[in-house]
Structures are given as structure tokens and as C-alpha cells.
Image (cartoon, helix red, strand yellow):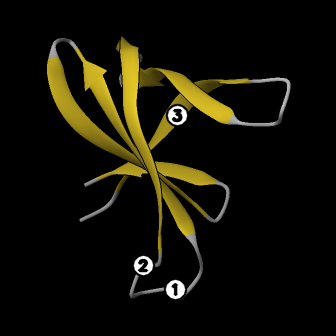
Amino acid sequence: MKKYIRINAEFEQDGTMIPVRIIWDNGAEYPISEVIDVRYFKPESSGKIGIKYTCIILGKIRDVYFEDARWYVV
């Protein structure tokens, strides 16, 4: 199940988007210490292209997704 979240992101000079912080509904914020992989994917539900960021958050590997101009986790 998708859980939509807020993300602070930075943009590189070449336009690359890098997530740097997750912000939950309750206001809790967690820094993303590193993005270790970025891949395009095609979700079955929408058929559009999305981006999966594999990140290190609080020392754990987590996936964060960007699709249709929205961020989510599963």
C-alpha cells in the first residue's frame, strides 16, 4: 500500500533530483544520508514511468518512490 509523504529534494546543475529528507504527516523529519541507487520503473497501476530511489535512512536501506509528481513509500 502506498503511503504518500513529503520529501525535501535538491537539484543538481544537470537537473538530477536528489531526495535529502523525509517528512511524515506527524511532522517527524528524517535525513536521507545517502542515495545508493536510482532506477526508472513502470508501475502496473498507472503505466507511467516512475523513479525508485534506494536510500540510507537512519542506517537502514529503504526505497522511496517518485511517480506522477508525488513521493511515496510502500
Most foreground residue, 30 or 48:
48
* The disc label shown at residue 6, or none: 3
> Mark 2 or mark 3, which is nearer the start of the sequence?
3
Asked which secondary structure carries label 2, the reply is loop
| Residue 59 at x, y percent in the picture | 16, 13
In the image, is 48 to the left or to the right of 12?
Answer: left
- The residue pinned by badge 1 equals 46
Asked which secondary structure carries label 1, the reply is loop
Which quadrant of the figure has residue 45? Answer: bottom left
- Calculate the distance from the C-alpha at mark 3 to the C-alpha at mark 1: 21 Å
Which quadrant of the figure has residue 11? Answer: top right
What amino acid does circle 3 point to? Answer: Arg
Which quadrant of the figure has residue 54? Answer: top left
- Calculate the distance from the C-alpha at mark 3 to the C-alpha at mark 2: 20 Å
Work out which quarter of the rendered image holds the N terminus and state it. Answer: bottom left
- Calculate the distance from the C-alpha at mark 1 to the C-alpha at mark 2: 6 Å
Q: Residue sitting at 81 percent across and 36 percent down?
A: 15
| Residue 65 at x, y percent in the picture | 43, 51
What amino acid does circle 1 point to? Answer: Ser
In the image, is 9 to the left or to the right of 62?
Answer: right
Are there few (<14), some (14-19), or many (20+) residues within 10 Å of tag 3?
some
Comparing labels 3 and 1, the label whose residue is closer to the camera: 1
Q: Residue sitting at 71 percent across and 36 percent down?
A: 16
> Mark 1 or mark 3, which is nearer the start of the sequence?
3
Are there few (<14), some (14-19), or many (20+) residues within 10 Å of tag 2?
few
Work out which quarter of the rendered image holds the C terminus and state it. Answer: bottom left
- The residue pinned by badge 2 equals 43
| Residue 51 at x, y percent in the picture | 51, 56
Camera sees residue 4: no
Q: Residue sitting at 52 percent across and 85 percent down?
A: 46
